[in-house]
Amino acid sequence: MRQLLLFLTVILVGIIFTARLFYLQIYNSSFNSIFDDNAIRKVYDYPKRGFVYDRNGKLLVANQPSYDVMVIPREIEPLDTLEFCKLLKIDKARFDSQLKKAKNYSWRLPSPFVSHLSKEDYAVLQEKMRKYTGFHIQKRSLRQYETTIGANVLGDIGEVNNRDIANDPYYKIGDLMGKQGVEKSYDSILRGRKGIKFIQKDRFNRNIGPYKDGKYDTLPQQGKDIKITIDSELQAYGEWLMQNKRGGIIALEPSSGEILAMIAAPTYNPNDLVGRKRSKNYTKLYNDSIAKPLFNRSLQGIYNPGSPFKLMNSLIALQEGVISNTEKVYCHNGYKYGNRFMGCHCGGGSRDMSLGIQKSCNAYFATAYRRILEKPANAREGIEIWSNHAKSFGLGNFLNNDLAVGQKGRIPDKAYYKRAYPERFYSTYTISNAIGQGEVVTTPIQLANMTAAIANRGYYYTPHIVKAIEGETLPDKFTTPKYTTIDKKHFEPVIEGMLKVYEKGTASSLQVKGLEICGKTGTVENFVIIDSVKTQLTDHSIFVAFAPKDNPKIALAIFVENGYFGSRFAGKIASLMIEKYVNKKITRKDLENWLLTHSLENEYAKPYSGEPFKINRETQYQVIPMEEVIGLPDNSNP
């Protein structure tokens, strides 16, 4: 019995040793286990990020070499700290804090110690790195923006945080990713894929060569180049016109939904967020809570659409058959409902649809709006019908585009007003919706998309920023038209009215010779809270337009905050940008000179200065030459 027990013990020990050897030699040599092996050093090889070009092939974003000093805390040997700090251009306090941060992350894994060394600093440092065991240099690429425009379009790249790493295991501490704009939207395409080398170490922690002769090493895959839809010359021109103004501009190509220009003012130089200066500059921009240069007003700014929304109410009224384009409504310098009165500045008189749009008559559109809501048995059902028509133009929701940020806006419906008016609801409760005020709010990109749908006579393409991706095709959602709920036949009367706005209406002073431009002015009341008191400031200036009337090439929406009435600032910008894009030259130099010599900074200072509300207070200022706006930056020191 004892001999049998001894035999079984020997067999059991043999099985245990065999299993352990199998684990060490076979299983533990698998690819996944390499990352947990302390005897193997992992060295990442970062690919070059893909280039970004504008729609005409002009290079906007390239790369420049950058170097990070990495540290593995457990491998550090005694060193001359002061000498090392001098080489890195940091102080002792920064050295200690970075080392503490690295130790908290991992004693055995590399993490960034000092990032974004310039080529000059790297040249000096690399010759002396042998003296600093535990530290090594990691080469990577930083962005080089070949222009000073389009910061809100292009975006920037920055170091990942813990949330980024948790959301995507591809990233490791110290990696860079797109933080805003195109860099964020197409980060997975632009970034490529990291390569990796596994280095075997001996028991003294010295490198002795590639692990398993490089069997598991991989090469980096360079990021793909992309071409975006932006016309860089139009973008630069729009940014130039928006000097010392705040607002958002979106210009679309109606036949494709491609975004020709996406301007948010005020803006900044994209090169300010590159390299070692990024953190300081980003903090400065982020903390500017007044001008908000990081806030993309063209995508995130939500405003009442004002009179341009009258175009929508015209189309809905025609579709629902509650008014014809020839029926006339009389305006008594406003619209009376119950014991209330909505004023109008059209001059009064008899108005059909075309003249109503041309003169922007509030009474005409209040009448049309009430008829829409009162057509069904009750106004709650009417507001639902009205809402569904408006939403078919992409209003009141995200557009399912490829942009990094956005806002839904709001088109109120039956459920919305059920919460506001649970007992009873009448069409007059929401009469402000007739003129684009009240509960209706839109973003510039939504209003531009609505205008493109009108230009196309009933359909639109999802607005998007990418035109082509190297080796790939665009998603179907960008190439498939989306149809509104309005029949094609109803668009012509509205378009004729928009044409007359330019010919002899509220934008008659903004005509461009030889161009049939269809537009609509808008003026929106502007209130802010000052010392807990609701205070009215200068109205916002809004304008939508497309051109030419037939076979349109551009549709746009412009919001200029505190810009007075629609034709004063926004309308002038619209005419100039249309002429710039369609005719490739500017003949209305009078409009250009006026815009470039009038500022709204005085208006923006009013809530903080205590200055009383006064009209016509735009201030003169020095014009920045166009060459400086589109000039090449100095990228010599990242």
Image (spheres, rainbow, N blue to C red):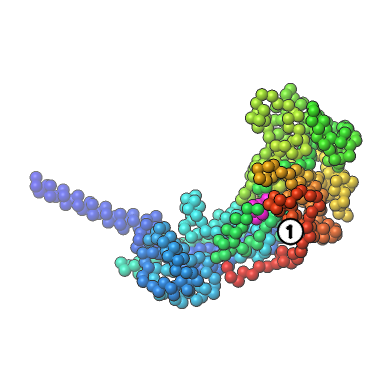
Report if residue 34 lies within the magenta region. no
Q: Position of residue 293 (x, y in %)?
A: 65, 55
Write down the quadrant of residue 304 in the picture.
Answer: top right
Q: Please name the predominant secondary structure of the magenta segment in the image.
A: loop
* Above or below for 82 versus 47: below
Residue 182 appearing in the image: no
Report if residue 295 lies within the magenta region. yes
Q: Position of residue 54 (x, y in %)?
A: 68, 59
Please give the name of the residue rendered at 86% of the width and 54% of the height, measured from the top-left corner: 512
Total number of numbered discs in the rendering = 1
* Above or below for 306 versus 289: above
Q: Position of residue 507 (x, y in %)?
A: 85, 48
Q: Disc 1 residue type?
A: Gln
* Above or below for 449 versus 428: below
**Residue range (magenta):** 291-298
The residue furthest top is: 377
Residue 34 or residue 604, whichever sits in front:
604
Please name the residue that numbered disc 1 is placed on. 243
Write down the quadrant of residue 234 in the picture.
Answer: bottom right
* Side of 549 relative to 84 (left or right): right
Which image quarter is the N terminus in?
Answer: top left
